[in-house]
Image (cartoon, helix red, strand yellow):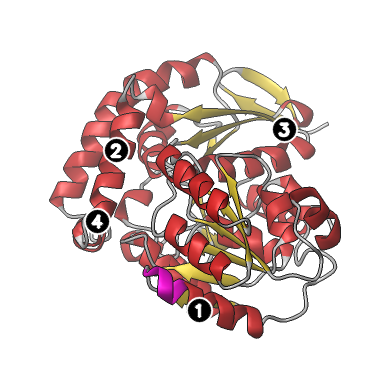
Amino acid sequence: MTQLTSQAGIRTVSDRQALLLSGSIGMGHDQLAEACATSLESAGWSTRTIDLVRLLGTGVGAASGAMMRGMLAMPGVFDAIHFSVLRTGNRFAELGEAASRYRLIPRLRPLLDADPPDLALSVFATGASAVGALASRYPGMRHIVFCTDATPHRLWIYPGVDLYLVTSAVAEQAVRRFQPDARILVVHAPVRVAFYHPLSQSSARSRVGVPEKERCVLLMSGAWGIGPVAQAARAIADAGVHVLAVAGHNYRLESKLRAAARQQPLVHPYGFCDRIPELMAACDLVITSSGDTCTEARVIGRPLLLLDVVQGHGRDNVQHELELGDAAVSSARASDVVRSALAALDHARPIPVTPTMSAAEWEGTLATALDMVGL
């Protein structure tokens, strides 16, 4: 049997360990980490996931989330930070990242010293930074960075990374801007396992209370519920379309959606829930901000209407989704969302019977990535 060597001693292939480094700002990083962990475990790896935001200390996650939401609520602020600071990696970005790394490394190093993994998989930019700085300390460990943004910014790219996983040719060149000799693999991002095995549309609709022959959309905008979700839900429903409206962790939005549902029965309100695969299977169209929900919709085979409400990397991601096709974009005004949604429904192609991608396809890609780094 093949053997692997680490500072912890000799491990057989069946004992391989992976450490996934995520960050609980929104849900996208955690969902990607979950999808990767599931695939690694199906290949015989043991996995553990660390939330680096939580590791930074009590209150950091809430403060970071509040700061991000505040910037997104002020037109142009996060655009300026992303395009002029993060993307270029100027002195301000480097100082901020150095401060996070200075606080994080003393907390992360004991965890790695105690049981060095064979693989560190960073799906959060701070993980790329911290593990990159520590990589030489663990010669038996391989470090893969996985970024699903259309254009990774400077803080994703560091020495000590054995392989970058990205989702477009543009993203590959964004990495090479700062590390021309980087090893890079362009991949389709994975999704959580339930999206590879969706219900039929008729079965899903019977569960959510939507008649089979009526039009239905899923409306959501990330874990924070950014944008005109409540106003658009009511307006689309007034146009005669069932709206499965998801508030995520935005409790104020959830209250607005439940109030709208009392006035308009075609609004079906949800808070934060684990029923997104079911809701997506039930709908004819997914209306959402750019992000990992788009990948999930594409796997299930639903067209997209993108809300242009996330500044910075969100604008890059909108352009990438449009390039991939089967997607339209709307501005944030509820009236514009209604017009675009009705047009998208009128021109939608037949719903596919089976998912457009399988877990086996992604697992084959992951096996290629692991082989590239000698695992």
Whether 137 is drawn above or below 324: the answer is: above
Q: Which residue is found at the position 48% from the left and 37% from the top?
A: 22
Which secondary structure is most common in the magenta stretch?
helix
Quarter holding residue 214: bottom right
Total numbered badges shown on the rendered structure = 4
Query: Could you tell which of marks 4 and 3 lies nearer the N-terminus?
Result: 3
Query: Could you tell which of marks 4 and 1 lies nearer the N-terminus?
Result: 4
Locate residue 289, reporting x and y percent: 46, 61
Element type at marker 4?
Answer: helix
Residue to which mark 4 is pinned: 78
Disc number lying in front (2 or 3): 2
Q: For residue 66, which numbered disc appears in the image?
A: 2
Q: Is residue 144 magenta?
A: no
At label 3, the amino acid type is Trp
Disc number lying in front (4 or 3): 4
Quarter holding residue 116: top right
Element type at marker 3?
Answer: loop
Q: Which residue is found at the position 37% from the left and 62% from the top?
A: 309
Whether residue 250 can be seen here: yes
Q: In 3D space, how far apart are the residues under numbered discs 1 and 2 (Cα atoms)?
A: 31 Å
**122 or 310: nearer the viewer:** 310
Element type at marker 2?
Answer: helix
Locate residue 207, reporting x and y percent: 79, 48
On-image quarter of the C terminus:
top right
At label 4, the amino acid type is Phe
Locate residue 86, reporting x and y percent: 26, 55
Residue to which mark 1 is pinned: 340
Query: Could you tell which of marks 2 and 3 lies nearer the N-terminus?
Result: 3
Residue to which mark 3 is pinned: 45
